[in-house]
Amino acid sequence: MSSSHTRHIGSFTPSTNRDRVSSILLQPPDAHALLVLGHGAGTHLDHPFMHGMADALGVEGVATFRYNYPYSEAGRGGMDAERVRLDTVCAAIDAATSAAPHLPRFAGGHSMSGRMTTLAAARGRIEHLHGLVAFAFPLHRAGHPDDTRADHLINVAFPILFVSGVRDRLANTNLLTDVIASLNQPAALELIKDADHGFQVPKRSGRTHQDIVKEVARITADWILAQTT
């Protein structure tokens, strides 16, 4: 992370009768947009992927607002009920808007958070966004190709960027391509060679996880810029 980036650690109330959860706003001095970035099901806001993606996006001029859910804040296994997770996504976007009101806003996240954010949008619970970003959208259970988890996407009114690894066992590439092609709103799919669900790559690829994170950040920043110009 550049020393010139502003890093603000905060918190917000995610849902009714829930304790506050942590958030981190990372804002480069030349930021041209803000991405509200949620984590995957088994991680947290400062997981290495989240930390690395925020840093890489900052280099590309995209500020990030990372956040926890109640279950990840408490460090317990399992997940909150879907209602609580949807409430948390909406509260995080509101908190991010207050923290950086002048920046065009995008929202999404890795795996579960990408799905929760698109689900909240499909149900009309999110407004005033320029687009959604889904890193490793979890289309189906590992090894069980199915597209029912994508049924709600047809009701999303915002442009969506999907970034998925070719080796992701939770998103069959052909099936994901077909789902995205069927959507009414503008949607883009970027496939990352050799990458799995966590954007890890085998040593034989000649690339590192850090290389992949930087590639995903560049792709995302370019797409975000295109939505705001």
Image: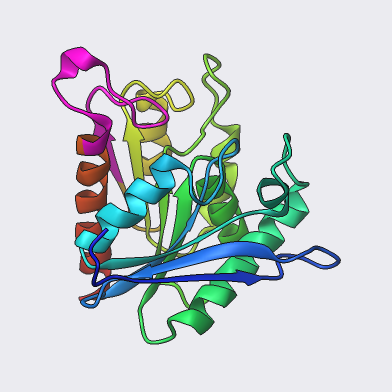
In which image quadrant can residue 26 be found?
Answer: bottom left
Q: Position of residue 183 (x, y in %)?
A: 42, 49
Residue with the most extreme right position: 17
Image quarter (top left, top right, bottom left or bottom right) of the C terminus: bottom left
Q: Position of residue 127 (x, y in %)?
A: 54, 75
Q: Is residue 131 magenta?
A: no
Q: Which residues are magenta?
A: 189-210
Say if 6 sits above or below 55 in the image: below
In which image quadrant can residue 141 be found?
Answer: top right
Q: Position of residue 66 (x, y in %)?
A: 49, 59
Q: Nearer the viewer, residue 151 or 9?
A: 9
Say if 178 sits above or below 96 in the image: above
In which image quadrant can residue 135 be found?
Answer: top left
Compared across the picture, whether 152 is left or right of 59 comes to: right
Say if 49 sits above or below 32 in the image: above
- At 26% across and 53% down in the image, what residue appears? 56
Instruction: Specify whether residue 114 is in view.
Output: yes
Q: Nearer the viewer, residue 143 or 39?
A: 39
- At 41% across and 41% down in the image, what residue appears? 48
Q: Nearer the viewer, residue 84 or 121?
A: 84
Q: Position of residue 42 (x, y in %)?
A: 59, 35
| Picture mark count | 0
Residue with the most extreme bottom position: 102
Say if 199 sits above or below 98 in the image: above
Compared across the picture, whether 81 is left or right of 141 comes to: right
- At 36% across and 25% down in the image, what residue appears? 196
Image quarter (top left, top right, bottom left or bottom right) of the N terminus: bottom left
Q: Is residue 190 magenta?
A: yes
Compared across the picture, whether 50 is left or right of 189 comes to: right
Instruction: Specify whether residue 123 is in view.
Output: no
- At 35% across and 56% down in the image, what residue appears? 54
Residue with the most extreme left position: 206
